[in-house]
Amino acid sequence: MNDKKPPKTIATINFKGGVGKTTVTWCLGDLISTYGKSDVLLFDLDAQMSLTQAITLNEDGSLHGKFSNWQERSEKGKKTIFNAIDEYTKPKSFNFGIDYDFIYQIADRYHFVPSSEELYWLELEVFDREKMKGLMRELLGKITWSKKVSNYHYALFDCPPSFTLLSYSVLAVCDLILIPVNPDFYAVKGVPLILNTLKMRIEPLPIPKIAVFMNKAKPYAGKMTRESQFYWNQVQSICLKASEQSGLNVKCLDTPIFDRVQIKRAITSGGIPDDFVRDFKSLWAGITDFLNE
Ligand SMILES: Nc1ncnc2c1ncn2[C@@H]1O[C@H](COP(=O)(O)OP(=O)(O)OP(=O)(O)O)[C@@H](O)[C@H]1O
Ligand SMILES: [Mg+2]
């Protein structure tokens, strides 16, 4: 008997660029696969490929040998994310087989579906938008039932700073939307925009839970500076208003990730810097409490 369960799915989204979507998604995946001993599947859905490059490139810009062998196999076997989308959008039934030619194993419990340059062209092709909405649901179903890959407890999606067809299909299936915000004027002003857009685009499908937290909070004596706290207070009141007025289930997680330069090497050095482990553990505790509510 196959006792697999679908993974809990979390999409990190903000239309604002550079707020830390990629960094935070990577660090959470690393934390929960290492400390939480959960099996995690990470998706890079951004055609910019920042996450994919960080994971797969050496310091001199060359590809890791292990990844380049895998990529060759994946492309030869037509097992990239783009091949999956291509298959899905054809009129015939969707028979895309899931195995480790589609999923790359970064570590024992931390697995990865890389992005592909071809995703840039996706938006220009004339795909049926309504059909695309179902892509991730179908793909996650296949991953869940495949006997050739792990039983993932969590699927984390690193989304681009725009609303693409792929983010659309993730939002239609995810359990939680995670929104990092930064302590600056424009980042705060962007919060109502993203909340309104999410509501407008996802309905009539159920809107996932939304968790907002501050990334790059400026530290002072173990807490946020007064300036960062000022912006965080604004974010909290915007989210409260959104929950009251539009019925969105938004929670502000009072567990900031601080602005520290060491995080810049987190992905390429393959782990969360020690200073950050506590920040991420607290953030993850808030996320799981909310997921289980
Ligand atoms: N807590 C932090 N402290 C210090 N630097 C950070 C922190 N979080 C992210 N950064 C840095 O901020 C920059 C942008 O981060 P990242 O690429 O994760 O953002 P993003 O939201 O994914 O960007 P994009 O919108 O382009 O996808 C990177 O240089 C990253 O190292
Ligand atoms: Mg990014």
Image: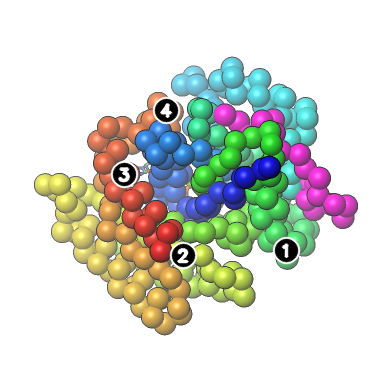
- CB atoms of marks 3 and 4 within 8 Å: no
* Element at label 1: helix
Q: Residues within 10 Å of mark 4 (few under 14, many from 20)?
A: some
The residue tagged 1 is 129
Q: Nearer the viewer, mark 1 or mark 3?
A: 3
The residue tagged 3 is 281
Q: Is residue 106 magenta?
A: no
Mark 4 and mark 2 lie on one chain; the one further toward the N terminus is 2
Residue sticking out furthest to the bottom: 245
Query: Is 63 positioned to the left or the right of 243 in the image?
Result: right
Query: Residue 279: x, y in percent?
Result: 28, 44
- Looking at the image, which is closer to me, 107 or 22? 107
- Looking at the image, which is closer to me, 188 or 277? 277
- For badge 2, the amino acid type reads Lys
* Element at label 2: strand
Mark-to-mark CA distance, 1 and 2: 23 Å
Q: Which residues are magenta?
A: 86-105
The residue tagged 4 is 270
- For badge 3, the amino acid type reads Lys
The residue tagged 2 is 209
- For badge 4, the amino acid type reads Gly
- The color scheme shown is rainbow
Mark-to-mark CA distance, 1 and 3: 37 Å
Checking the image for residue 181, the label placed there is none
Quadrant, the N terminus: top right
Mark-to-mark CA distance, 4 and 1: 37 Å
* Element at label 3: helix
Q: Nearer the viewer, mark 4 or mark 2?
A: 2
